[in-house]
Image (cartoon, helix red, strand yellow):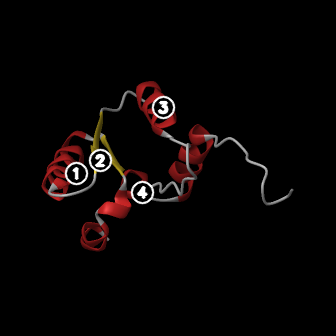
Amino acid sequence: KKYTDTYPLNLEATHQDICELVDAPERVPIIFVLTPGSDPTELVMGLAKKKKKEVQAVSMGQGQEVVARRYIATSIVTGGWVLLQNTHLGLKYLVELE
């Protein structure tokens, strides 16, 4: 039971912890390892709205690395957030991003 119970993520507390622990929190990715049927998009969008951050989302897959690069470049300048979804379809890009 200890390993099968689920606990809701407090994304706001996680974000606050990151902001308190590192010098450049805007450069710290938050990575979600999901189970079937889970989707943190609403949590991310809700926190972004509260923090007055623009979110650009891209579902990774064939050719979407170009879009992701553009979103990241834009967000570096504007201070927005980028939500990369289905990253298992863009593993080569994640290595590049690292």
* CA distance for labels 1 and 4: 12 Å
State if disc 4 and disc 3 touch (CB < 8 Å): no
Check disc 2 and report the residue beneath it. 59
Decide: is 39 above or below 33. Answer: above
- Residue 20: x, y in percent? 56, 51
Decide: is 62 above or below 13. Answer: below
SS category of the residue bearing label 1: helix
Check disc 4 and report the residue beneath it. 29
> Sequence-wise, which precedes: disc 1 or disc 3?
3
Under mark 1, the amino acid is: Ile
Under mark 3, the amino acid is: Glu
Q: Nearer the viewer, mark 2 or mark 1?
A: 2
Q: Nearer the viewer, mark 3 or mark 4?
A: 3
Q: Residues within 10 Å of mark 3 (few under 14, many from 20)?
A: few
Check disc 1 and report the residue beneath it. 72
* CA distance for labels 2 and 4: 16 Å
Q: Residues within 10 Å of mark 2 (few under 14, many from 20)?
A: some
> Sequence-wise, which precedes: disc 1 or disc 4?
4
Under mark 2, the amino acid is: Ser
SS category of the residue bearing label 4: loop
SS category of the residue bearing label 2: strand
SS category of the residue bearing label 3: helix
81 on left or right of 61: right
Check disc 3 and report the residue beneath it. 42
Query: Which residue: 30% across, 74% down?
Result: 95
Q: Quadrant of the N terminus?
A: bottom right
> Sequence-wise, which precedes: disc 2 or disc 1?
2
Under mark 4, the amino acid is: Pro
Query: Which residue: 79% across, 50% down?
Result: 5
- Residue 76: x, y in percent? 23, 49
